[in-house]
Structure formats: C-alpha cells, structure tokens
Image: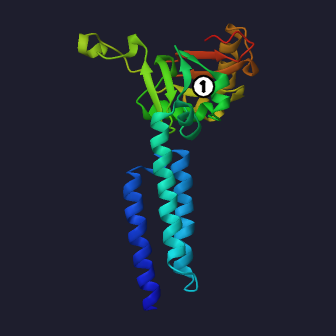
Amino acid sequence: MAVIFIRTVIIYAVLFAVLRLMGKRQIGELQPSELVSTLILSQIASQPIASQSIPLSYGIVPVVAVVCLEVIASYLTTRVPALKRIFVGRPSILIDRGRIDQAELLRQRVTVEELMSELRSNGVADPGDVYYAVMEESGSISVLLKAPASPPARQDLGVEADERGMARLVISDGVINRENLAALGKNERWLMKRLGEAELTAADVFVMTCDEKSNVRIVKKRGKGGGS
C-alpha cells in the first residue's frame, strides 16, 4: 500500500510539473496537439500507479518525452506558418460583412442554433447587428458589430429607444421552430403570411428571426438569392 502511495505521489508531482510547463489553458481553449498530449499523459501516468509490476520509469520517461514533443511543436508553430495551420488551424469567418456564410458553417459543423447561442453570449440579440463573426482557433467566436449597432449607444446620445427584446430563431435551415413562434405569441399562419410577402416558403429559408417588436430578418438558402 505504501509503495502505491509513493508511486502515486511521484507521478502526480511529475504530471504537475509537466502541465505547468505546458501553460495554463481551459479545456475548451486547448489546441488539438495539446489535447492529444493531455489524453496521452493521463493514460501513460495511470499505468505505473495501477500495476506495481510496471517500473516507475516506464511512466516518467514517456511523460517527459510527450511534453518535450509538445514544447517543440509549440515552438515550431510560432516559426513555421504552414505547421501552425496543421497543428493549430486558422480562424474561420462565419458572418462576413453582415452575411452568414452558410458554406463555412457547414465546414465547421456549426448549426444555426449554436451560432445564435454564441452571439447571445457575446451580448448580441439580433444577428442582423453583426458585421463579422469569427471562429477563433480555440473554438470561441469573436463578434464585430455593424457601425449603427456599435457604441456609443443611442442612450449616450440622448436619443430615446424602445427595447426590441431578443431575436428568436423561427426557421433554421428550412425547419420551423414552433416553440420560439409560441414564445413570440405567433403561429404558423402568421409565419406563412410573412413568408408569402417575401415570396418564399420555409424550405427556401436558411435563417429567419423575429423579435418581440415583430421585426423580422430572413436569410435565404444558397441558390435562393442568399439575401436577407
């Protein structure tokens, strides 16, 4: 029992030192190479603890080797742009100059619901206010607002403004969100009327949002005009 305890303490100390060398990161901010290293380290470190028949060095040496590889990879990515694209990736523009890039959303496997959630977490209630939305290498999304929606706010200029409320997703990639319609006090009859005014069907729509003041924004699917 004492041997297991001592081996555990030693492995813990080695892993602690290794992770300190790798730097502070939240799980969601880990680069792919860092996540792979972390998973390998956890597997390697557990073997000498679980089995006394495995020499302690069989756990320590691979741990040191993995962290050396990670440090070397991190150094090379700062010096060689091509390697950075392989190990780290590059930012992806999801909203480009006010237009949702449907192809890029598909490539990055980001749903409209996920995009809307990220915009709300950035304090944006209406995607129509966004000029650029960029998915960073860490997976977080940075948002740049359009000039009219950027500070200073209208209240700073002494101009009265009514609350619009949060824009809700009522159509996502051709699928009607009845729950959000009900939350807005609307129904499918109202929705069909608004779509008819735009000479569209639900199947033609990539994104349709509506706020509490009945302000509607529509983004058509590719091949349907792609406008809003």
Residue 165 visible? no
Image spot of residue 68 (x, y percent):
47, 55
On the image, which quarter does residue 165 sit in? top left
The answer to whether one can see residue 154 in this image is yes
Residue 158, how many percent across, how many down? 23, 11
- Is 112 located above or below residue 25 in the figure? above
- Count of marks placed on residues: 1
Q: Which residue is mark 1?
A: 186
Identity, as a three-letter code, of the amino acid under mark 1: Lys
Q: Please report the residue visible at 53 percent of the width from the left and 78 percent of the height from the top.
A: 48
Residue displayed at 51% across by 33% down? 80
In the rendered view, how is the structure colored? rainbow
- The answer to whether residue 160 is above or below residue 69 is above
Residue at coordinates 68% horizontally, 8% vertically from top-left?
Answer: 198
Residue 17: where, in percent of width, then height?
37, 63
Check disc 1: other Cα within 10 Å, few if <14, some if 14-19, many if 20+: some
Q: Quadrant of residue 5?
A: bottom left
State the SS at label 1.
Answer: loop
- Direction from residue 52 to residue 164 in the image, left or right: left
Looking at this view, is 210 or 112 the one in front?
112
Query: Furthest-bottom residue in view?
Result: 1
Horizontally, residue 17 falls left or right of residue 209, namely: left
Q: Residue at x 43, y 66 (%)?
A: 15
